[in-house]
Amino acid sequence: MKDPTVRAVLAKIGRYTFLSVLLGFFALPMLWLASTPFNAHPTLDVSISSFTLHNFSVLLKDPYALPSLWNSLLLAGGTALLTVGFAAAAAYALSRVRIPGRNGILYALLLLSSIVTGTAAMVPLFELAFKLHLIDSRVGVILVFTGGLLPAAIFILKDFTDNMPRSYEESARVFGASPFQIMRHIVLPMIRPGLATVTVWAVVNVWSNFLIPYILIRNPDKYPASVVLYTFYTEGGQPDLALISAFSLLYSIPVVLLYLFVSHRYGFRFHGGIKR
Amino acid sequence: MARTASPRGTDTEDPAGLGRARAAAISAPALLIIAAFLVFPALWTLYLGTTDYRLTGFAARHPRGVGLQNYTNVIQDPDFHHSLWLTVEYVLFSAVLGQALLGFVIAWMLRDTRGWLKRLIEALVLLAWILPSSVVAFLWVAMLDRGSGTLNALLNTPGTAWAIEHPMAVIVVFNIWRGTAFSMLLYSAALTGVPPSQLATARMFGANSWQQLRDVVFPHIRGHILTNLLLISLWTFNDFTPYQITAGGPDGKSEILPVYIYQTALFDGQMGLGAAISLLMLLINLVVALVYLRLLRERRGGRKPERVAP
Amino acid sequence: MTQIRTADLTKTFADAGGGVTALDALTLTIEDGEFFALLGPSGCGKTTLLRTLAGLETPSSGAVYIGEADMTRTPAGKRGVAMVFQDYALFPHMTVTENIAYPLRVRGVPKAQQREAVLAAAADLGLTGTDTTVGLLDRRPEALSGGQQQRVALARATAAKPSVFLFDEPLSNLDARLRLEARTFLKRLQRELAVTTVFVTHDQAEALALADRIAVMQSGRIRQLGTPREVYRRPANTFVASFIGSTPMNLLEGVVRDGRVLVADSEIAPPDGTGERLAERAAVVLGARPEYFRVSPDPLDGAFRGTVEVAENLGSSLLLTLDVSGTAVQVVVAEEDEPEPRATVWALPRADRTLLYADGELVG
């Protein structure tokens, strides 16, 4: 039997040691992102031998860097809009009108979505886009992303609508609201945290995806940031660390801001009711 | 009583008076997009799995049906066995043991904490999760670099090429770093649902931390644990990001299945074969999903698992 | 003039085992301006009936008339009814003002008029004009107390200017203290508005206190329809007798002998004027409320003789459980008449309040 105060102190030391190691583990890889963009002689190590913003001014002059962020924004925004809008409508309908086997269908679609985002479906996707004249079209990329993200989005949102007490809709209905008024006035505002979560999730997915735009987009003017990041090479064929680090930072900031905004405003939640 | 005792019939199912026609109409756009851009390419992939389709050459234009040839080839291929085994290790160590355990430990340790330390830890863990994957891959490549990587500087092990000497360990640790956030979020939410009165009761009877976890917390969050394990297992199983760090190498020592498919289908150009492996992967996903759903259902006394969200 | 009428109203829910009958050929008339209670245990069909009146359930057969019109197939929003739900269903993302204005917003009433109607309804419901209600109209429902939430729900219902109010368990979400206050308030409000009002409750005291008339329901049927006084004094059957009353009525099995009822080794006089109608040796149930006994430490003629088993303090009175030859009989005595534990007492049921049931139905 140890002295209880000694034990308490040991427990406290153990706790803070663990938390420090944890902090180190998660922070370590990010140090490079925080330091290198401002380093006049960027290398793979973490140091600022001489502080500079020169890397960013080089980046601003690059013909593809900033437009690619705009392109990413268009793709992510378009996909998020379609995904959230269509998924919310479908989730609500599936949640409120009994369709035999609806859960089975949803699970099947979820599993299929893992194929389509995989590499093997790239050729069918390419051929499909080709036949529909959607090669080199942002709409094509958005539709392909939306198709892949919708099942999980419906799944997440259905969890929110399933957990919404029915009396709200019934109450509005007795006051004379039409089904569409009920959706607009009651259902959508009430599942806002879910809509926000799905938006962030869709944007983050599209923002970082490399393969789909790489295959479907030909014109470098339309390349999103994820593709452009792989085009920064020096004339000697070496990765241009100055551009890569500075661009990585710029490229990361929007998703971080979006996340911060949504989590502050709505609370970032993956559950309306995984709570049982 | 009202809601609970009123028999569940067709009307209470549809509180807004939506009706089947309108329900079908508003779900149509989602279903059409899913059908065109998800189900159709997926089925096409399944079809390609029965052909000798190649990216280039004669078979690119005129693929021949080869029946189950691709499947028998894959199943007998030692490279496939090797890759499958690596994937199982990858999922087991990085997702089931790594992310889930670390996510729970963080959620548990920080459950009663407030203030900057909690916010800082949560922010970093979440940051690792939401940064774009190409950026994250660069960060790790830089950190693990043989010459000037931070890790070698920190551990005083100059010249160690981590990604070459320990490729599996690297991608396992990487995936823990990358994905712990989801488990942490989910378990934090779950732990708020454990009634404090039950924990207090257990403490009053002298239960230590482990006994409290075993007897009070785990029974309460069992559903969350299973849902979490299901999702992170599936995600990790299909994760392609390790390719950006080790490229499956060296000598296929970290060639997990998604990378193996990539090498076969796009690098070697054997699309038919790649598609066949995809189907096998899908079947494995299906089995994993069914096992978890089965466990979830048992807990609910045979009721349908209506509420599982990613 | 808003009378509500149902004719042969039947509702069956599809179920694995064939079907559950929630309403069984129910015919009922609720008069204009009446405060009407649907009372019964869980699953008796009372909520289904209310929801059918609202249009939230479609009957399997039969008809619903509201006013002169057949409303059986009229959609929920077009019946001129307003419903207050058990959980109030106040929209959490709207302020109190927006909640109260919602019925008008749906109808496309201009904003200025909405504002006016909200203020009027809020004033009627006591949501303005006191220290505790400052700024209340701009708050969200979550920032209100339970009692305030209920008033907002009522205000929203009155703002709709309905010809019928439907309340689903209106008081069940309030704590005990608040409930009495809200009950008085609700009754006064209904009197002032004089709008036909139907409410559902499982609490017999609530139904007795509020309603002009009560329909006691069981298994989709009405077992008794009457004023609170009728339902309390002369329950039409043993189901109603056991359901109504805050201390349950004694229902004692016995047989008829020589024009008297033999119960628990005691001979009790039957209710006035029934003695000669009863067949010899017929099996009957004697009903006597605990409140309607005369209890004495000295022998009384035609009384139960028992020993005091349990004494429960009800405040101004005591509820005694007597052991009468192995049968439990409950009686209420005034606080000053508390007997010693295990004392022997005589309990005489009041002849004019004693009831007799044969085959479950009231015979006298």
Image (spheres, helix red, strand yellow):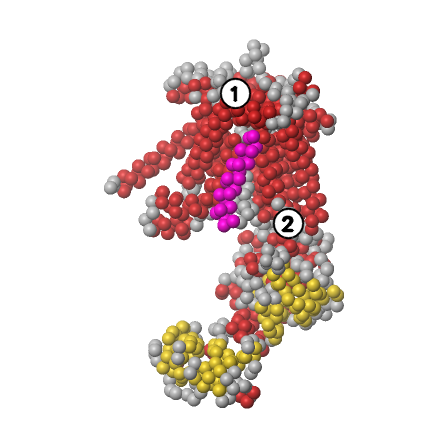
Does the magenta-highlighted stretch encompass residue B133?
Answer: no
Q: Is residue A50 above or below residue C198?
A: above
Circle 2/circle 1 CB separation < 8 Å = no
Q: Residue visible at 62% across and 18% down?
A: A62
Q: Residue visible at 48% across and 30% down?
A: B88
Q: Is residue A136 left or right of residue A29?
A: right
Return the chain for callout 2. A
Q: Amino acid at mark 1?
A: Ala
Marks 2 and 1 sit apart, C-alpha to C-alpha, by 47 Å
Does the magenta-highlighted stretch encompass residue B283?
Answer: yes
Which residue is under mark 1?
Answer: B247
Secondary structure at badge 2 equals loop
Q: Dividing the image into 4 quarters, which one contains the N terminus of chain A?
A: top left
Return the x and y of residue C230 as percentages of the image width and height: 58, 78
Q: Residue visible at 39% across and 34% down?
A: A19
Which tag is nearer the camera, tag 2 or tag 1? Answer: 2
Return the x and y of residue C8 as percentages of the image width and height: 68, 68
Front-lying residue, C39 or C100: C39
In the picture as drawn, the residue positioned furthest to the top comes out as A236
Return the x and y of residue A26 as percentages of the image width and height: 45, 29
Which residues make up the magenta segment? B280-302
Return the x and y of residue B129 as percentages of the image width and height: 51, 32
Q: Is residue C151 above or below residue A257?
A: below
Q: Residue visible at 49% across and 77% down?
A: C251
Which residue is under mark 2?
Answer: A98
Return the chain for callout 1. B
Q: Amino acid at mark 2?
A: Arg
Mark 1 Cα-neighbour bin, 10 Å: few <14, some 14–19, many ≥20: many
Front-lying residue, C202 or B164: B164
Q: Is residue B28 left or right of residue A9?
A: right
Q: Quadrant of residue A128?
A: top right
